[in-house]
Amino acid sequence: MTTVPLVIVDGANVVGSVPDGWWRDRAGAAIRLRDRLAAVPPAGLPDIPGPVEVTLVVEGKARDIPQADNGVRVERATGSGDDKIADLVRVAARTRRTVVVTADRGLRERVLALGGEVRGPSSVPRR
């Protein structure tokens, strides 16, 4: 069992939780989130001490953002971001603590049913 928890961030949902004009530049908003998440791998989340592994799931117009060398892995959903997140949880939760950051109620239920945990968008740096 891997001891380092996996934190999966629902990029579209977390970006959408801050009304800062993200809808005018979805890719730019996803890049800003990716860069702010760089603080999470060493520090962890408020109730999960670091180190943690962080995966940002992007979809739609944000899908083609570049991978950065900042400790945040970018996973591109070819279809639904929720489906991609569920697939990642289905595999990871078998061997390690897996936490999804989202406010999406349907996704929350799916993650919990697959053995993952859920935190709200305010648990990660959004600004």
Image (spheres, rainbow, N blue to C red):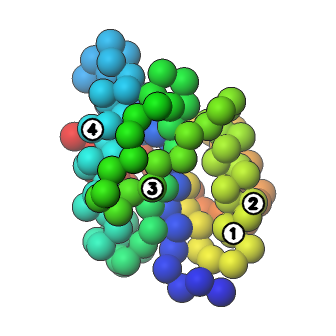
Q: Which residue is mark 3?
A: 73
Q: Nearer the viewer, mark 3 or mark 2?
A: 3
Residue 35 appears in the figure: yes
Q: Nearer the viewer, mark 1 or mark 3?
A: 3
Q: Are marks 1 and 3 in contact (CB under 8 Å)?
A: no
Q: In x, y percent, where is residue 124?
A: 34, 53
Q: Is residue 127 above or below residue 120?
A: above
Placement of the C terminus among the 4 image quadrants: top left
At 69% across and 69% down in the image, what residue appears?
Answer: 93
Q: Which residue is mark 2?
A: 90
> Callout 3 environment at 10 Å: few (<14), some (14 to 19), or many (20+)?
some
Between the C-alphas of marks 1 and 3, the distance is 17 Å
Q: Amino acid at mark 4?
A: Arg
Q: Find residue 93 and name its label.
A: 1
Which tag, 1 or 3, sits closer to the chain's start? 3
Between the C-alphas of marks 4 and 1, the distance is 28 Å
| Residue 126 placement: quadrant | top left
| 79 on left or right of 10 | right
Q: In x, y percent, where is residue 50?
A: 35, 77
Which tag, 4 or 3, sits closer to the chain's start? 4
Q: Is residue 87 above or below residue 77?
A: below
Q: Secondary structure at mark 3?
A: strand
Q: Nearer the viewer, mark 4 or mark 3?
A: 3
Q: Secondary structure at mark 1?
A: loop
